[in-house]
Image: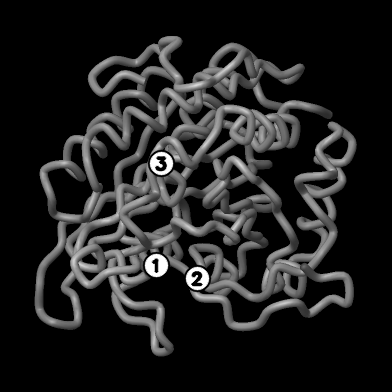
Amino acid sequence: MLVILLLCLVASCRGDANGGSATQRSAGATSTATATGFNGSAAYDYAKSQVDFGPRVPGSPAARQAGDWIIRQMRARADTVIVQAFDYTTADGKKLPLRNILARFRPELSERVLYITHWDSRPISESAATEAEKKMPVPGANDGASGVGMFVALGDVLKKTKPSVGVDLLFTDGEDYGQFGPPEVDVLIGAKYFATHLPSPNYKPLYGVLWDMIGDKDLRIPYEMYSFQQAPEVVSRVWQTAADLGHGDVFVQESGGQIVDDHIPLLNAGLRVIDVIDLTYPPHHTPHDTMDKISAKSLATVGDVATALVTRK
């Protein structure tokens, strides 16, 4: 899904498929409830619900079912759900039906925080070891479903505990469809669409965070350097919150390089959005990006930070 353009810029560098309630069926998951109220086991179960549909490649039955599931879950939790449905014509002339899903908490508040994750998965596994595997779609447990699972579990918290600011959870479609290049072709589609179709003409969140590939069992999140260079105050806010919560061993103060991801179109549109991502993940863009590679503990760590950012004064 992503391209690293520059590495090590800093000297120190190195659910149920049909239902809405999480059950205790996480493989190897222990209790992962946090002080903020976020539950990593629930997030894991919600991520599994996505993976159980199959690869969420745009235009496929699995994508349609998974998108419908997200809409149902968020309508049961958020105050308002907006679906941006649109058709996109690829470089080779194929027409893709896509949907961005925007779940809003406390929509009456002008001070807002925007969270983003993508919910589609990649149609090919170009990083796989064999030619046969390279033709297979990516299951997208970490690369797609982990962010969705975290968002739905965050929705559980925000339904019970009003956030201190308005919160917008944006699920983008078509992030991972084509080639990241250079040049980029048929990627970041939903984020580019949202950047030109904002919820209102004056939409200007206080800041935004893209949460991507956040479930890796061996989670370690360095700075993404486009974020560090263009919205350093947001990076500081997120990493300091993580440190305050005791997660400084995961949110490390090192460079992870410059990464092309869904935050780029939003930065280009003038929104202060950063990328929280662990791209050091061997199953990335392979058929082995499966549920056994992610953990409820990692999701609890990231979800704890995401929750604290919008619920603590």
Spatial separation of the CA atoms under disc 3 and disc 2? 21 Å
Viewport quadrant of the C terminus? top right
Viewport quadrant of the N terminus? bottom left
The residue labelled by disc 1 is 188
Q: Nearer the viewer's eye, disc 3 or disc 2?
A: 3
The residue labelled by disc 3 is 145
Residue 103 versus residue 142: which sits nearer the camera?
142
Q: Nearer the viewer's eye, disc 1 or disc 2?
A: 1
Amino acid type of the residue tagged 3 in the rendering:
Ala
Amino acid type of the residue tagged 2 in the rendering:
Pro
Going from N to C along the chain, the mark reached first, 1 or 2, is: 1
Q: Nearer the viewer's eye, disc 1 or disc 3?
A: 3
Badge 2 marks a residue whose secondary structure is: helix
Amino acid type of the residue tagged 1 in the rendering:
Leu
Residue reaching furthest front? Answer: 130
- Where residue 8 sits in the image (x, y, percent)? 75, 77
Residue appearing at x 68%, y 41% in the figure: 111
Left or right of 94 on screen, residue 70: right
Badge 3 marks a residue whose secondary structure is: helix
Q: Are marks 1 and 2 in contact (CB under 8 Å)?
A: yes
- Where residue 12 sits in the image (x, y, percent)? 88, 70
Residue 284 versus residue 42: which sits nearer the camera?
284
Spatial separation of the CA atoms under disc 1 and disc 2? 8 Å
Quarter of the rendering containing residue 304? top right
Residue 165 versus residue 245: which sits nearer the camera?
245
- Where residue 244 sits in the image (x, y, percent)? 89, 36
Going from N to C along the chain, the mark reached first, 3 or 2, is: 3
The residue labelled by disc 2 is 265
Residue appearing at x 70%, y 53% in the figure: 221
- Where residue 204 sits in the image (x, y, percent)? 61, 55
